[in-house]
Image (cartoon, rainbow, N blue to C red):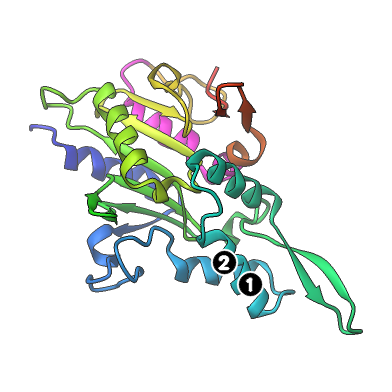
Amino acid sequence: MKVTESHVEEAALEWLEALGYAIAHGPDISPDGPAPERENYAQVVLTGRLRAALARLNPHLEPDTLESVASRLLQAETPSLVEENRRLHRMLFEGVGVEVTRPDGTIGGETARLVDFSDLAANDWLAVNQFTVIEGQIQRRPDVVVFVNGLPLGVIELKNPGAENATLTGAFNQLQTYKAQIPSLFRSNAVLVSSDGLLARIGSLTADAERFMPWRTTDGAAVAPKGTPELGTLIEGVFEKRRFLSLLRDFTVFWDTGDGVAKIVAGYH
């Protein structure tokens, strides 16, 4: 049987589903789909899931306060994608500071959580394939987008292993095109994944092609045998829920290089 890009996509979704992610088909949740979760194709955050998560994780905060948190997440504060990514990364692992009025009338500070790093089940985990985004006059459709609490944290670009130009470089270049043409999808991005159907690599928002690295283990103990599909190992190794949140919180840093800001995500060593 000839292996096509859709077969690779289906396999990726099956691996994610086995890890406990809900699966949705992009056209189904599109603005004109049967179960819409987006008001338009420019909207990259699933706001219904985001607002539900904010309410669930922060029962101590009033709805108006949580709506102001959502607004801070949804509205860009800087035209720089990397700086915006750094801002949202900090909010993801530190929470969002808010002012509240105490029962005695005084003003105090509280923190709104965006993610529950302890109780994994308190978060909303979703993988969506064929997620169409229109920004300006440009329409793009990444293969798989991974959402946590409605925020797009992972983008997986796949190539047909049987096609002549299906290479890791081709998948990497496609991700760079997405970043340039639909940057809103990457404001909260944690990881990027490229695969030609056989080989697979993971990198950060700012990583060049040489910094997209393989992931060799699903459990941190045993190295996957040669011949094991690299994409499966990478997905099971990186997107396992607790490991994924740990990678986001404990193994990601931003570094001022002098020539700009580099985002560094730990790889498998």
Q: CA distance from mark 2 to mark 1?
A: 6 Å
Placement of 65 over or under 165, stated as above or below: below
What residue is at 43 percent from the left and 53 percent from the top?
21
Quarter of the image with the C terminus is top right
Please give left or right for residue 193 compared with residue 157 in the image: right
Read off the residue under disc 2: 70
Taking the image as drawn, is residue 55 in sight? no
Placement of 210 over or under 161, stated as above or below: above
**SS of the residue at dot 2?**
helix
Most foreground residue, 140 or 239:
140
The residue where tag 1 is placed is 66
Number of marks drawn: 2
Question: Can residue 70 be seen in the rendering of this structure?
Answer: yes
Which residue appears at 36% of the width and 69% of the height?
37
Whole-percent x, y for residue 24 in the image: 32, 59
**Range covered by the magenta-colored residues:** 226-245
Say if mark 2 contacts mark 1, CB within 8 Å: yes
**Crowdedness of circle 1 by 10 Å Cα count: few (<14), some, many (20+)?**
many
Between residue 103 and residue 145, name the one nearer to us: 103
Image point (11%, 27%), residue name? 163
- The amino acid on which the numbered mark 2 sits, given as a three-letter code, is Ala
**Residue drawn 72% across the image and 74% down it:** 61
Looking at the picture, tell me which residue is in the foreground, 153 or 242.
153
Label 1 SS: helix
Magenta stretch contains residue 154: no
Q: What is the magenta segment's predominant secondary structure? A: helix
Instruction: Measuring from the top left, give residue 1's x and y in whole percent.
Output: 7, 33
Tell me: residue 173, above or below residue 45.
Answer: above
Label 1 amino acid?
Leu
> In this rendering, would 246 be left or right of 185?
right
Which one is nearer the viewer's eye here, 263 or 130? 263
